[in-house]
C-alpha cells in the first residue's frame, strides 16, 4: 500500500484541475466500472479523484519523458514514451 493510500484523507491537499466534459465523463465512467468490478465490499471508494492521483503518480514517475514547450508537445512526448498512439479523450 502506498504512503498516500495509508495516510488517510487528512494528508491529501486539494488541487483544482480543469477537465474537458469528455475527460470528466470518462473518468467518472472508469471509476464506476472499477467500483462495480470490486471483489470485496467496504474499504476505500474508487472515485475520479482516486484515478487522478494515480495518473499524477504515473506522470511523476516518468517525468523524464516530459519534453516540450506547451501542453500539446508535452502530451505527445509523454504518450509516445508510454507507447500510446492517440492521447486525446476530448
Image (cartoon, grey):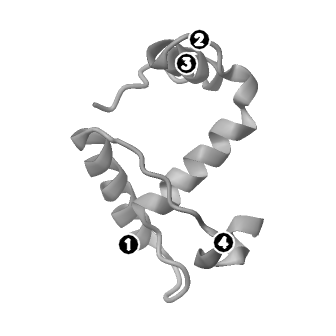
> Residues at badges 1 and 3 in contact (C-beta under 8 Å)?
no
Judged by depth in the image, the label closer to the viewer, 4 or 1, is 4
Which residue is label 1 attached to? 36
Disc 1 vs disc 3: which is toward the camera?
3
- Marks 3 and 2 sit apart, C-alpha to C-alpha, by 5 Å
Residue 23 shown left or right of residue 54 in the figure: left
Q: Regarding mark 2 in the picture, which secondary structure is present there? A: loop
Residue 47: x %, y % from top left = 42, 66
Q: Is residue 65 above or below residue 90?
A: above
In this rendering, the answer to whether 4 lies above or below 15 is below
Looking at the image, tell me whether mark 3 or mark 4 is earlier in sequence order: 4
Please, what secondary structure does the residue beneath circle 4 have?
A: helix
Along the polypeptide, which appears first: circle 1 or circle 2? Answer: 1
Q: Nearer the N terminus, badge 3 or badge 2?
A: 2
The residue singled out by tag 3 in the image is: 74
Disc 3 and disc 4: Cα gap in Å? 29 Å
Q: Which residue occupies 28% across, 31% down?
A: 90
Disc number placed over residue 11 in the picture, else none: 4
Q: Nearer the viewer, residue 16 or 83?
A: 16
Residue 4 x, y percent position in the rendering: 70, 66
Q: Answer with left or right where residue 72 lies relative to residue 33.
A: right
Amino acid at each position: 500500500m502506498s504512503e498516500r493510500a495509508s495516510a488517510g484523507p487528512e494528508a491529501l491537499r486539494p488541487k483544482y484541475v480543469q477537465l474537458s466534459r469528455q475527460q470528466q465523463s470518462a473518468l467518472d465512467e472508469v471509476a464506476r466500472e472499477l467500483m462495480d468490478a470490486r471483489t470485496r465490499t467496504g474499504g476505500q471508494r474508487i472515485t475520479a479523484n482516486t484515478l487522478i492521483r494515480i495518473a499524477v503518480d504515473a506522470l511523476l514517475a516518468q517525468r523524464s519523458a516530459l519534453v516540450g514547450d506547451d501542453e500539446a508537445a508535452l502530451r505527445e512526448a509523454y504518450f509516445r514514451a508510454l507507447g500510446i498512439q492517440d492521447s486525446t479523450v476530448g
